[in-house]
């Protein structure tokens, strides 16, 4: 065969060059598996005699492997026995006496894994299911000169070993890591687009995990799940630039000092025209006022540049240090406004106001931790009567309360009236 015409989506082009580790993560419809299947065929063509293993954590049968996908690619490319490819029951023979095999890691022991020592490429599909033991066995086993380990997965939990390896800690040396979602796929089919929209409308709490590569949220009744999913699908979770000429508004939820204190939170926002831009998020536990002030200075939110909004308990004295937050921030030079207690039903009022304003909201990536909290924030349900008893007080409620405060404080920008020009009659 003289040439092979393979189109590659832009997001995957960095992976065309050699690298010890190649990791692609993201949601459904991104084309991750298709890309790796095609790269595997190209590798076998350009490296005759190469030995490749396609791995899953558990593989009960070849039907669960990538074998059918690879065979489909070979058929589409018109590659067969004349080109050195031959699909057999348990493997695919490749040019120059090479081979592609399919195995499950749970079938291996520390001894049996040594059978893969001479392999040149290991492609780990559904890598989110790989155990720490499997990763520990596999990585040093694939050791041939120039050998590579490929990983493709839809994220599940932050604690999954593959996520800890490539996303939570410093990744291994010589790693290429890409995030790929449906909107990175130039060949995303209409059928999947309808599936995506149906998920967005009918299962908003699952949308981010399924389509955007987000981690699974245990909350199926989160107050803001639908709104966050819509914001992400519309590109409103992105790089949001700070306007140096506009005031930075800092909305707080009061914490305290000590190991058992509630968290202290700031949401930093700017009102730009009809947009509400959230440019930063800050949450700590048990730190004193000087720690918060240091963070404000580090971010450039200095007196005169920023205004602080506190909930009604911002004027209550701290039981340990006998100060209140309002006086402390004012002594540091800040303009401070304390929002009065909204009375019974205040929490639900904040939620309703925030939902009404969500279409105006844009979020910088610095706010990801805050968005994660909003995506978890959910009601406490009376199971006997199946009624909402109000927000559940857990780790997410501190960021959610400060966020709600920002919505209560929002004022619609007033349009400037145009000066009427005098009417001039010309005879």
Image (cartoon, rainbow, N blue to C red):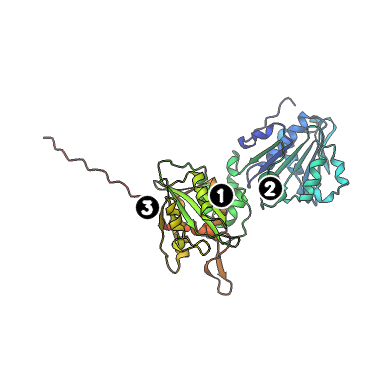
Residue with the mark numbered 1: 368
As helix, strand or loop, the secondary structure at mark 2 comes to helix
Picture coordinates of residue 192 (x, y %)? 60, 47
Q: Is residue 356 visible from the viewing direction of this image?
A: no
- Contact (CB < 8 A) between labels 2 and 3? no
For numbered disc 1, what is the local secondary structure? helix
Dot 3: what SS? loop
From the top left corner, tell me how far across and down residue 76 is, in percent: 71, 36
Q: Which picture quadrant has residue 167? A: top right
- In this rendering, the answer to whether 204 lies above or below 72 is below
Q: Which residue is mark 2?
A: 163
> In which quadrant of the rendered image does the N terminus lie?
top right
Q: Which residue is mark 3?
A: 412
* Image position, residue 304 (x, y; %): 40, 46
Q: Residues within 10 Å of mark 3 (few under 14, many from 20)?
A: few
- Residue 29 is left or right of residue 424, and the answer is right
Tell whether label 3 touches label 1 (CB within 8 Å). no
* Residue 214 visible: yes
Horizontal side of residue 271 vs 73, given as left or right: left
Task: Identify the image quadrant of the C terminus.
Answer: top left
């Amino acid at each position: 065969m003289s040439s092979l015409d393979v189109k590659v989506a832009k997001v995957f082009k960095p992976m065309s060059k050699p690298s010890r580790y190649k990791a692609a993560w993201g949601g459904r419809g991104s084309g991750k598996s298709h890309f790796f299947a095609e790269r595997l065929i190209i590798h076998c063509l350009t490296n005759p005699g190469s030995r490749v293993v396609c791995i899953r954590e558990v593989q009960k049968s070849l039907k669960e492997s990538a074998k059918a996908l690879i065979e489909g690619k070979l058929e589409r490319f018109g590659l067969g026995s004349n080109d050195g490819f031959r699909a057999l029951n348990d493997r695919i023979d490749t040019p120059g006496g090479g081979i592609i095999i399919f195995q499950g890691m749970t079938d291996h022991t520390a001894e049996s894994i040594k059978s893969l020592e001479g392999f040149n490429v290991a492609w780990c599909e559904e890598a989110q299911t790989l155990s720490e033991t499997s990763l520990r066995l596999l990585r040093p086993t694939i050791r041939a000169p120039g050998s590579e380990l490929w990983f493709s997965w839809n994220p599940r939990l932050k604690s999954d070993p593959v996520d800890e390896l490539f996303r939570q800690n410093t990744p291994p040396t010589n790693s290429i890591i890409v995030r790929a979602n449906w909107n990175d796929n130039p060949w995303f089919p209409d059928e999947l687009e309808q599936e995506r929209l149906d998920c967005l409308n009918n299962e908003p709490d699952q949308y981010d995990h399924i389509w955007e590569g987000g981690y699974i949220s245990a909350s199926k009744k989160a107050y803001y799940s639908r709104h966050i999913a819509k914001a992400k699908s519309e590109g409103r979770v992105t790089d949001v630039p700070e306007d140096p000429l506009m005031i930075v508004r800092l909305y707080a939820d009061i914490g305290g000092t000590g190991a058992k204190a509630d968290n202290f939170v700031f949401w930093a926002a700017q009102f730009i025209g009809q947009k509400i831009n959230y440019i930063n998020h800050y949450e700590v536990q048990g730190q004193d006022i000087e720690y918060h002030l240091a963070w404000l200075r580090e971010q450039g939110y200095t007196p005169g540049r920023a205004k602080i909004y506190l909930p009604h308990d911002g004027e209550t004295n701290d039981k340990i240090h006998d100060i209140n937050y309002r006086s402390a921030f004012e002594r540091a030079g800040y303009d401070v406004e304390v929002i009065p207690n909204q009375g019974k039903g205040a929490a639900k009022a904040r939620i309703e106001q925030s939902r009404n304003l969500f279409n105006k909201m844009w979020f910088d990536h610095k706010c990801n931790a805050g968005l994660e909290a909003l995506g978890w924030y959910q009601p406490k349900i009376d199971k006997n009567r199946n009624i909402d008893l109000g927000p559940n007080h857990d780790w997410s409620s501190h960021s959610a309360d400060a966020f709600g405060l920002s919505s209560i404080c929002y004022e619609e920008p007033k349009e400037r009236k145009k000066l009427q020009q005098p009417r001039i009659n010309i005879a």
